Image (cartoon, coloured by chain):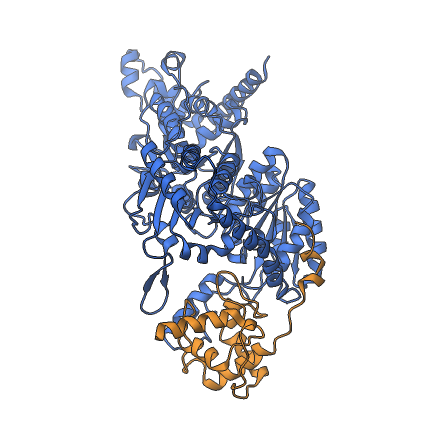
């Protein structure tokens, strides 16, 4: 007997057992009444079969209480063709049949079912996972309320252009809903809540429809620009019996991964001419590299042009160990540039302009007049109307609507053709200047890091360097953004491989960090046990502290360091700005923005969820030992948390 | 012209110790300045040690920026810094703050910190 047969038989025995037990307790009184009513009257002839059927309150087929195969089993078959490794969920009855099919019929393998304590965790986990694994994982959410919980996480993934597969249960037909709760969790149009910020959605009306839409959805999610796809799985389709005859009619389409859109050859040639002719070209890389190949190509292009690269860090784009990585001089370089190549800009307008946040908002250009701008981006291929993530319009001189990573090899070739046979001699002095500037970056960063080295609360620079001391001999990955901690890892650590860093949230929805870190850590675990660290603000962490339970439950090791400034600090600064603007004094600014009185004990919270909890650490001299213990726990396979009381930024 | 002055003010404050010192500052109470530094939220953007932070504000510890420019930057910030008018920080409070940031502890030499000298 194979393992699958064994599992299936056990499942059948279990279900039959449940039916027998249920029948004994619930159906018996009705059965007794029916028997009493059917006692033949001496003066009357027995009722015919037809009369009996007419008198029944429920149709004859309702006597069928079990089935060996359901629509949800077929849905598992569909998902298994997509190479989905995980399905994350907070339980919900509108997908109960799918859950049962995945864990029993599907043997809880590929995809493996992951237990989350909030739908935002399930989808946020998928967000972080995809950025490391390079492929989607799935989340499934309860009808209506689960979708509402998941919405912000889906929005972050949409803004960040990350592929995730989201399924939602729903009881569509009203005559199939039980009175009460099922009505509250049913909806006419399940995706309406999130339609403005998914790439595609569908509500399949048949199992064949489900198969085609799920495969189509996966392909669409992965096509550049990627994004979330939302498939509603009707409960009747899930729970309905699937007999062999119907099953034979079903087919699962073959998934064909799409090739990505490269830039128009003429536009690429013109861009190359413009870049080679420029005296001060600058490359800005934003949501550009999705693999090591993307990084390597960017280095090749930058070296050909001897052009500085400003890495906006929405992805790991440019190794900061390369002398042409000049992010530290972004302002000056953009101001002096005569040609800017922008790769997958999140906000091209914001790259070129700055708005002053004072009572009267004024805009000034960061770039000099007449600068030529070349944009290579999939931005225009995924623009919706309501949510304004598309930013302000900029008319670039050459706007190549294509995937920048796919286009770069042809741009490199075009640049090579444009450079005279003797080489790009005019670029050599430029390169020399870049080397000289690069050599000063480390010294400047070290000097700035020393400024508050012994300060209490602990400085962000001290924390990052104490952490680096424990990581530098490991194969490590940082799965958190560093904008709120002065970009220290990008200034002080060697960020040399694509997997070292995954960028930020996309939509700035607070709560992304702990959940994305969980998913990213899962992908890193599967990739071979890298030591994963996430620096998480206390406000962020409080949105989903139970991620640590999911990590402990499923054996996902990573180190969370709470950057504990005891506030929603960005909002502290915003409220202070308003108080200043209104000349009302600053005494009340902490109201509604600080997280103290009482202080939260994050180490105990971590321990309560089954993770290693260390801290609070307030003395910078205690950091080294605390981080050593935390990293040791992670290397031993445990999730760990260190609470570090820190400076605001 | 006003724009040029504003830009200079911003640049000079950011430059900190690189600028020439002027002795025209009024007498300030550094102890009160320390209290004010926390109360009026200077630390929020510039850090408790005045070390500055990449996205919020430059270093101001031990500034050699002249008091007049310091005050002008408070009242008419050149960049994203929120304005501090006299209703929020009086001239005397500003002098106290100035005295405090001027006497903040000297930073350590990065070459004396082993973690900052380890090979990347």
Does A10 appear above or below A539?
above
Residue B71 or residue A439, whichever sits in front: A439
Q: Quadrant of the N terminus of chain A?
A: top right
Give the percent coordinates (x, y) of residue B66: 50, 80
Q: Quadrant of the C terminus of chain A?
A: bottom right
The chain letter of the blue chain reads: A
- Color of chain B here? orange
- The number of numbered badges drawn on the structure is 0
Give the percent coordinates (x, y) of residue A487: 54, 55
Residue A429 or residue A260, whichever sits in front: A429
Residue B47 or residue A277, whichever sits in front: A277
Q: Is residue A181 visible?
A: no
Does A605 appear above or below A86?
below
Give the percent coordinates (x, y) of residue A252: 40, 19
Residue A473, image quadrant? top right
Q: Is residue A235 visible?
A: yes
Q: Residue at x 40, y 79 (%)?
A: B85
Question: Which residue is the extreme one toward the front?
Answer: A422
Give the percent coordinates (x, y) of residue B113: 70, 61
Q: Residue at x 55, y 15 (%)?
A: A5
Residue B52, image quadrant? bottom right
Question: Which residue is the extreme one toward the bottom?
Answer: B27
Does A76 appear above or below A314?
above
In the visual, does B54 lie left or right of A256? Answer: right
């Amino acid at each position: 007997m194979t393992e699958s047969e064994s599992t299936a038989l056990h499942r059948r025995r279990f279900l039959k057992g449940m039916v027998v037990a249920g029948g004994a307790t619930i159906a018996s009184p009705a059965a007794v009444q029916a028997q009493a009513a059917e006692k033949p009257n001496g003066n009357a002839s027995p009722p015919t079969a037809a009369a009996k059927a007419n008198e029944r309150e429920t149709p004859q087929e309702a006597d069928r209480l079990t089935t060996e195969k359901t629509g949800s089993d077929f849905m598992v078959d569909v998902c298994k063709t997509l190479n989905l490794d995980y399905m994350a969920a907070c339980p919900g009855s509108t997908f109960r049949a799918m859950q049962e099919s995945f864990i029993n019929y599907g043997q809880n393998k590929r995809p493996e079912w992951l237990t989350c304590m909030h739908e935002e965790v399930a989808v946020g986990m998928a967000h972080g996972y995809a950025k490391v694994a390079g492929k989607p994982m799935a989340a499934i959410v309860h009808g209506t309320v689960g979708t509402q919980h998941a919405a912000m996480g889906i929005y972050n993934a949409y803004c960040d252009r990350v592929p995730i597969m989201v399924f939602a249960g729903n009881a569509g037909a009203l005559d199939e809903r039980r009175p009460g709760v099922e009505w509250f969790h049913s909806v006419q149009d399940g995706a309406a809540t999130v339609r403005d910020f998914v790439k595609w959605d569908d509500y399949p009306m048949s199992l064949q429809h489900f198969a085609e839409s799920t495969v189509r959805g996966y392909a669409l999610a992965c096509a550049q620009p990627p994004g979330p796809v939302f498939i509603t799985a009707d409960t009747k389709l899930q729970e309905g019996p699937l007999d062999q005859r119907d099953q034979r009619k079903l087919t699962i389409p073959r998934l064909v991964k799409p090739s990505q859109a490269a830039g128009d050859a003429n536009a690429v040639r013109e861009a190359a001419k413009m870049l080679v002719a420029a005296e001060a070209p600058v490359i800005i890389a934003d949501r550009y590299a999705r693999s090591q190949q993307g990084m390597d190509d960017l280095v090749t292009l930058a070296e050909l042009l001897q052009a500085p690269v400003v890495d906006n860090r929405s992805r790991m784009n440019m190794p900061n160990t390369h002398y042409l990585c000049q992010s530290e001089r972004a302002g000056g370089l953009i101001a002096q540039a005569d040609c800017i190549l922008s790769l997958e800009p999140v906000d091209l307008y914001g790259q070129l302009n700055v708005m002053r946040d004072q009572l009267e908002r004024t805009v000034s250009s960061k770039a000099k007049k007449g600068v030529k701008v070349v944009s290579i981006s999939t931005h225009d291929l995924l623009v919706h109307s309501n949510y304004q993530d598309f930013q302000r319009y900029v008319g670039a001189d050459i706007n190549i609507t294509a995937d920048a990573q796919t286009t770069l090899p042809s741009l490199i070739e075009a640049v090579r053709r444009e450079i005279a046979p003797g080489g790009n001699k005019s670029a050599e002095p430029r390169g020399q200047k870049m080397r000289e500037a690069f050599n000063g970056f480390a010294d400047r960063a070290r000097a700035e890091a020393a400024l508050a080295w012994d300060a209490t609360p602990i400085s962000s620079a001290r924390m990052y360097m104490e952490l680096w001391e424990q990581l530098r001999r490991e194969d490590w990955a940082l799965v958190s953004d560093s904008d709120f901690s002065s970009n220290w890892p990008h200034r002080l650590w060697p960020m040399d491989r694509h997997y070292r860093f995954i960028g930020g949230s996309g939509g700035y929805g607070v709560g992304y960090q702990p959940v994305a870190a969980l998913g990213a850590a899962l992908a890193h675990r599967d990739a071979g046990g890298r030591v994963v660290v996430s620096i998480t603000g206390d406000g962020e962490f409080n949105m989903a502290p139970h991620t640590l339970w999911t990590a402990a439950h499923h054996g996902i090791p990573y180190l969370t360091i709470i950057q504990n400034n005891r506030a929603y600090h960005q909002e502290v600064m915003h409220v202070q700005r308003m108080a200043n603007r209104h000349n009302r004094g600053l005494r009340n600014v902490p109201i509604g923005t600080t997280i103290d009185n009482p202080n939260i004990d994050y180490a105990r919270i971590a321990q309560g969820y089954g993770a290693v909890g260390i801290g609070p650490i307030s003395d910078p001299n205690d950091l080294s030992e605390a981080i050593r213990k935390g990293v040791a726990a992670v290397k031993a396979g445990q999730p760990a948390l260190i609470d570090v009381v820190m400076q605001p930024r | 012209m006003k724009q040029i002055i504003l830009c200079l003010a911003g640049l000079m404050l950011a430059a900190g110790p690189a600028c020439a010192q002027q002795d025209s500052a009024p007498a300030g109470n550094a102890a009160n300045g320390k209290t004010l530094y926390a109360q009026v939220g200077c630390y929020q953007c510039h850090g408790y040690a005045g070390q500055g932070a990449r996205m919020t504000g430059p270093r101001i510890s031990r500034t050699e920026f002249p008091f007049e420019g310091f005050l002008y930057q408070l009242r008419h910030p050149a960049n994203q810094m929120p304005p501090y008018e006299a209703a929020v920080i009086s001239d005397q409070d500003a002098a106290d703050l100035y005295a405090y940031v001027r006497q903040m502890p000297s930073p350590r030499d990065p070459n004396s910190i082993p973690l900052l000298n380890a090979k990347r």
